[in-house]
Structures are given as structure tokens and as C-alpha cells.
Amino acid sequence: MKQTILSISLLAFISTQSMWYDRPIIETIPIDTLLIAVMAVESNFDTMAYNSKENAAGVLQIRPIMVREVNRLLGEDKYTLKDRWSKAKSIEMFNVIRSHTKNQTNERIARNWNGGWNGHKKQSTLKYWQKVKKQFKK
């Protein structure tokens, strides 16, 4: 029940996001599923999750470099490190990265989220993608 409510609220939130970015959001339904799967893998939906080894925080385990990259893509300092603890702001940052991903596929978006812009080329992100893909089946 909790995941169903989360899924519905994410769907409503994400559907409003496409008007905020220059690029359209592609594959609305699979992307929603992707976002839910990534949150499950990254933090098991825990907004207070923290990985001190990587200084990754929040539901999407955002590191400081990701905050800087999102701000660079937007051309303004819109997000701060504190925003990583907000589920809504974390989802917005994910959507910015997703909207700037070339050749958008769920795999490429997930692997780039995990490993940076060349994450889709890194062997190390294949295991991450398998975990995300497994979440699609749940």
C-alpha cells in the first residue's frame, strides 16, 4: 500500500515536471518506474539515508558533485547540499540529469546516475543496472 501511494504521488509530481525543463521528458510511464526503482536501490525510499564514505545523502543518494552538475546544467545555483535531504528536490535534480541524458533509455539514465556522464560505458555500473532492473519486476 505504501509503495502504491508513493508511486501515485510520484506520478503526479513527475507529470508536472516536464514544463520546467527545456527538453521534454521521454517515456513518461517507464521513467516513473525507473525513478521508483532507482530510489529503491539507492536508499530503500529513505529520505534520511546517508553514505559517509561518498557523502551521498537522501532518497537518491546525491553527492555534492551531482548538485554542482545540476546547477551547471541549469545555469544557476538553484540547489544546495541541503536540498539532497528533500525528496521533492532530489527528484527535481534526477529529472534535470535525466532530461540532459543523450539517447535516453532506462539503462543509460540509471547507469549515468550511478557513474556520471560516462556511466553507461563503465563496467562498474552494470551491477547497479541489474539491481535497478530487478526493481522493475517488484
Image (cartoon, helix red, strand yellow):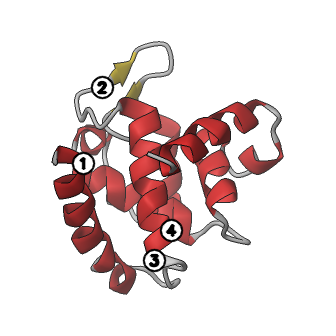
**Residue on which disc 3 sits:** 28
Which amino acid lies under the numbered mark 1 shown in the image of this protein? Answer: Gln
* Residue name at image x 34 percent, y 61 percent: 92
Of 62 and 4, the residue lying toward us? 4
Residue 25 image offset from top left, x and y in percent: 49, 79
- Mark 4–mark 2 distance (CA, rounded to whole Å): 25 Å
Check if mark 4's residue and mark 2's residue have beta carbons within 8 Å.
no
**Residue on which disc 1 sits:** 3
- Mark 4–mark 1 distance (CA, rounded to whole Å): 16 Å
Q: Which mark is first along the chain, 2 or 3?
A: 3
Q: Count every numbered label the image shows and give the total.
A: 4
Which amino acid lies under the numbered mark 3 shown in the image of this protein? Answer: Thr
Check if mark 1's residue and mark 3's residue have beta carbons within 8 Å.
no
Check if mark 4's residue and mark 3's residue have beta carbons within 8 Å.
yes
- Find numbered disc 2 in the image and state the secondary structure of the residue it sits on: loop
Q: Nearer the viewer, mark 4 or mark 2?
A: 4
* Residue name at image x 44 percent, y 34 percent: 42
Position of 68 compared to 50: left or right? right
**Residue on which disc 2 sits:** 49
Q: Which mark is first along the chain, 2 or 4?
A: 4
Which amino acid lies under the numbered mark 4 shown in the image of this protein? Answer: Pro
Residue 64 image offset from top left, x and y in percent: 45, 36
- Mark 3–mark 2 distance (CA, rounded to whole Å): 27 Å
Q: Residues within 10 Å of mark 3 (few under 14, many from 20)?
A: some
- Find numbered disc 4 in the image and state the secondary structure of the residue it sits on: helix
* Residue name at image x 16 percent, y 48 percent: 1
Q: Nearer the viewer, mark 1 or mark 3?
A: 1
Instruction: Give me the disc on residue 30.
Output: 4
